[in-house]
Image (spheres, rainbow, N blue to C red):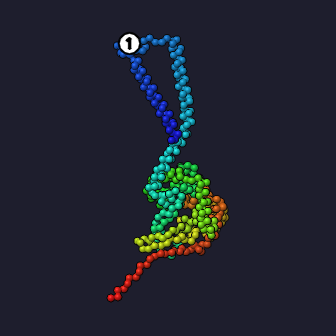
Amino acid sequence: MYAVTTERSIAMALLAITVVGWAIYVFVNIRQSKKELGSEIELAPNRGSLPDDNELEGSRLEKVQAFGVLMLLIIALVLPIYWLREGGRRSGAEVGFAERAADRGEGRAEELGCLECHGADMGGANFAPITLDIGNQFSDRDSFIVNTSWRGPALNTVFQRFDTGASALDEVEEVRNILVFGRGVMPAWGLDGGGPLNDQAIDDLVAWLWRERLTDEEATARALSAKETAMAAEPDKSEGQVLFELHCARCHTPRWPGRGDAQLPNDSGLIEVLPGPPGSGRYGPALNSVGLHRLFADPEDQIAFIANGAADNVPYGDQNTRLGNYGMPGFGKILTEDEIRAIVDYERSLDPDEQSTVEFAELFTEPAPAEEDGS
């Protein structure tokens, strides 16, 4: 299956030849041995007749020398060949190790139900049931918990958004941290984040994600198809708004995308989960004309930030007011510069005054008043 199999086969063949050779040698020597004749003096090899100098330094010596040259030739040829193939053997071992880890990660993902939130095709197309805190800083209601549904992000493009510079598994850091410590509504899975999985299980999940990742070209093509479909369905929306809703609203708009009715605790009623004002902030900060002009005085700086994402513990924005971490992904490998510019224009057009309130459509069923007894 891998290059390691070839070397192993050669080694086993050489071992077999060596073992058989020694067995033949021992057998022949036993057959040629003489029975004990008496005293050790009579059995001593130097007591018998030996070849003379002409024989020892003639054909017999040439045979021994020829055998030595043959063995030297074999060593001179075999060792370099083995050394030249060492890289392939090591690469094959690494590939085999990664494949086995990815298989374990796939099984682990099935056990954890990862695809229930992120889509059976890992494209993030499913709505998954979650427990959500519906209250936030813009609401005049008390915070309460509801059971609703949410859209998980795509997994097969996660390396286009995080760890974009990684070229091998051992260079992956951001995705591993997300799995360990969680992100947004996704729970923490690693022991350090309070989850149930040890480091080996997390590494297996990373190996699985790495194996299933799309190429940059495939990720760009899917993003373009999603944009065209959304714009055709809602032609009144600008390109920037459509792209914002596809890629940014999940973190920067309360309760996005908000689907259907949510059951309140203790079966006390239903509430329709509606998105808050666009860009008014959720897991990410509020985005509007005032805040973004203050954070990124030059729109080009904001475009570069969206393209590259946040680097860990590296300040970004004017006056170094914020520190980056793995929370903000980069979209430069998914979206074109013109598409990112359209998002920036849309975000910088948002009005902070419109983000100051959150509306709810409540569908409570009030119990009918009890009829008074007329008797």
Residue 233 vs 22, above or below: the answer is below
In-front residue for pair 247/234 = 234
Residue 104 in sight in this render: yes
Where's residue 58, x and y in %? Answer: 53, 14
Q: Is residue 373 left or right of residue 210?
A: left
Residue where numbered disc 1 is placed: 42
Amino acid on which disc 1 is placed = Glu
Quadrant location of residue 344? bottom right
Q: Give percent across and percent down for residue 69.
A: 55, 23
Q: Residue at x 55, y 49 (%)?
A: 168
Instruction: Write the residue at 55% across / 68% down.
Output: 253
- Quarter in which the C terminus is drawn: bottom left
Q: Which residue is painted at 59% across and 65% down in the image?
A: 230
- Percent coordinates x, y for residue 236 in the rendering: 62, 70
19 in relation to 34, above or below: below
Query: Which is nearer the eye, 1 or 289?
Result: 1
Q: Quadrant of residue 347?
A: bottom right
